[in-house]
Image (cartoon, rainbow, N blue to C red):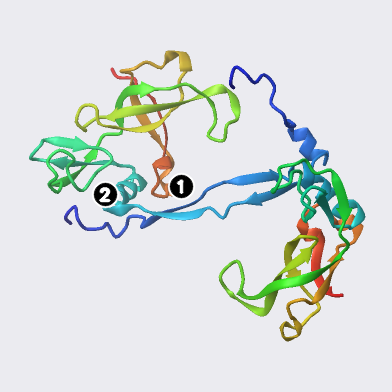
Amino acid sequence: MTLLQRDPNAPQAWVDNLPVENRYTYGLAGEKFFRTIKDEARIMGTHCPNCDHTYVPAAAFCERCLGKLDEWVDVGTVGEVVTFTLLNIGLDGKPLEKPEIIAFIRFGDGGLIHRLGEIDPEQIEIGLLVQAVFKPKNRRVGSILDIRYFKPA
Amino acid sequence: MTAKIKEFPGTSLSEQDFKEGKVLFNFDKLNGIFAWDTGIGIGTYLAALKNGVILGSHCSTCRKTVVPPRTVCEWCYRPMDQYVPLKDTGTVNTFSLCYVTWDVKRIKEPLIPAVIEIDGASPLHGIMHMLGEVDPKDVKIGMRVQAVWKPAAERQGSINDILYFKPLKED
């Protein structure tokens, strides 16, 4: 065997897993935004009186005038579908039996990206009003997934 | 820290704060599975380790023996001529007493990573491994050491088939 041939008994590859874990804390405004979802099942935004702009999810500072935002507004649980897409392939790369529907839902001057449920893909249209379906209170942990999906309002 | 700023705004969080649910957070794990092609040289090296042999390769033009084996000579860029089995003994070239683990945990008893010049390889050619069965105070550069192998049945073609190197008592 020359040195330029692979040893057939040699391991072809070293297979391992990088143990990379992370914790993301939501920050000042994010903490209050998710805390309200968890405790009260409400979606909050912040309003900038200077720019007359309502940020959803709530932000601590205005992106336009850099002013501090402390005017909190309840934007309700009904938003408008701005755009949507159907996912036919799961995270593992395998085809899904039923496509998952992901939409951008407008609240205030911002909005949330989330799943749509209780709806056929054919029924969705841009401008459709959809309502948040929350998990029961004892199952909510303070995550965007405390909202299970949005259903037609 | 800059001289002008003494106090930074923000909130320091402790592990306790996370446990008590004082702060909301999102936990995530990267899907960090990878496969690294061992290549010809290292593949052969790992296969030899499984058989309890530290393998090097020899260039007869440069009269150099390197470990781990490479397929191309780093000095003359010619293909290496042959693999050579080396002894599992060697000399400590350099070492460190390490009081922090790879995932940044403090430990009382230090880990002792060392570069070990393997007997049979050219001078200054060696591998990095751990030292064991030794008092950290007694580790010296130039110390003679010998590999402690895993039982043959447990070896899997990995550098960890050698558990560590222990001091060699020579008569």
**Residue B13, numbered label:** none
Q: CA distance from mark 1 to mark 2?
A: 23 Å
The answer to whether tags 1 and 2 share a subunit is yes
Badge 1 or badge 2: first in the primary sequence: 2
The kind of residue tagged 2 is: Gly
Q: For residue B139, what is the image quadrant?
A: top left
Q: Classify B133 as above or below A146.
A: above
Q: Residues within 10 Å of mark 1 (few under 14, many from 20)?
A: few
The kind of residue tagged 1 is: Glu
Is residue B24 visible from the viewing direction of this image? no
The residue wearing badge 2 is B41
Q: Quadrant of the C terminus of chain B?
A: top left
The residue wearing badge 1 is B154
Q: Residue at x 71, y 42 (%)?
A: A66
Instruction: Single out the residue that lies furthest toward the top.
Output: B137
Is label 2 in a helix, a strand or a loop? helix
Q: Chain of mark 1?
A: B
Q: Position of residue A125 (x, y in %)?
A: 74, 81
Q: Classify A99 as above or below A111.
A: below
Looking at the image, residue B34 sits to the left or right of residue B79; the answer is right
Q: Classify A40 as above or below B165.
A: below
Q: Position of residue B132 (x, y in %)?
A: 45, 26
Is residue A5 visible from the viewing direction of this image? yes
| Residue nearer the viewer, A81 or B134 | A81
Q: Chain of mark 2?
A: B
Q: Position of residue A135 (x, y in %)?
A: 86, 62
Q: For residue B76, what is the image quadrant?
A: top left
Q: Residue at x 76, y 60 (%)?
A: A109
